[in-house]
Amino acid sequence: MNTTTIVLILAAIVTVSIILIVGSQMRERSRIERARRMTFQEDQYKRAHRLLDEIPGQYLTSELKLLLIKNMEEACQQLSALKSPLPIKQWLEEIRQLKNTVLENNDNRSPVKIDSPEKSNYVKELLQSLFKMIEGMHKTGKLDNSTAKKNLKYVLFLVHKTHADLHVFQARDYVRQNEIRKAIHAYHLASTEMGKSRDNPLAMKAVKSFRTRIKELEAMGPENDTRSGSQEGQSKLDKEWDTFLHDDEWKKKADYDD
């Protein structure tokens, strides 16, 4: 075997080795990228599912629920295309049933009391995550400008309402304890929070209601039976506030596109 033949054989071996190494690296990169994409889509699904489950029922409109469901559905479709070993078919069937329930207006989720700073902050974090999700859907073209703007403004309103909910809960507690000055201060804080959503007619309705309640409490002199009087007025405000997001008249008038 002459020198030329040996050189050619060695060159062929080197070439084949390089091809095999490059091919192996490409397969590994493809595997890693596929795993990364699957992890991302799984996280998208789980995040939307968590928001749907954990955001207080009184906060979620049908439109927000459908946006979350849409995110879950798209994540499952991507996972299916990537041949994920996760139970995608089961998830898609559950999503289909949930979507029908929402469309038929039968998805009745229990309201959650915001009765501690910890709960208020947790719900705020959930709403901030929802805000980012809607922003992401808008940036990727999954939501048009009008729909994105409307829902982003509504979520911001919910963030303010979360703080107001806590202040109202505290005010109620102060009234029960006959600590009227503290109750008035708590209602002032609630009014300030709702005032941050001035373009929302429902928020302005709340501000007006709080101001009325504050005047009622301020008008009570020491000679009055403050406990019974304040509880009577409080009962009315409690009912209005607890059904606040179910105001049909407001829903007809509200317009977030302005």
Image (cartoon, rainbow, N blue to C red):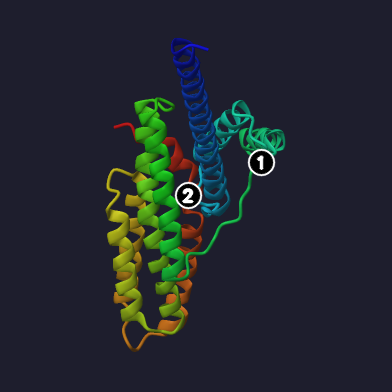
Q: Residue at horizontal 55%, vertical 34%?
A: 75
In the figure, residue 94 lies in which quadrant? top right
Q: CA distance from mark 1 to mark 2?
A: 17 Å
Amino acid on which disc 2 is placed: Leu
Which residue in the structure is indicated by mark 2?
245
**Residue 209 drawn above or below residue 18:** below
Q: Is residue 11 visible?
A: yes
Label 1 element class: loop
Q: Residue furthest bottom?
A: 223
Q: Residue 162, image x and y in percent?
A: 41, 58
Q: Residue at horizontal 61%, vertical 51%?
A: 109
Q: Residue 229, image x and y in percent?
A: 43, 78
**Residue 112 drawn above or below residue 15:** below
In the figure, residue 38 lies in which quadrant? top right
Amino acid on which disc 1 is placed: Asn
Q: Between tags 1 and 2, which lies in front? A: 1
Closer-to-camera residue (29/110): 29
Closer-to-camera residue (17/179): 17
> What number is the disc on residue 57?
none
Q: Residue 34, image x and y in percent?
A: 53, 32
Dot 2 alpha-carbon crowd within 10 angstroms: few under 14, some 14 to 19, many 20 or more? some
**Residue 199 drawn above or below residue 169:** above
Which residue in the structure is indicated by mark 1?
106
Q: Residue 71, image x and y in percent?
A: 52, 35
Label 2 element class: helix
Q: Residue furthest front?
A: 2
Q: Is residue 229 visible?
A: no
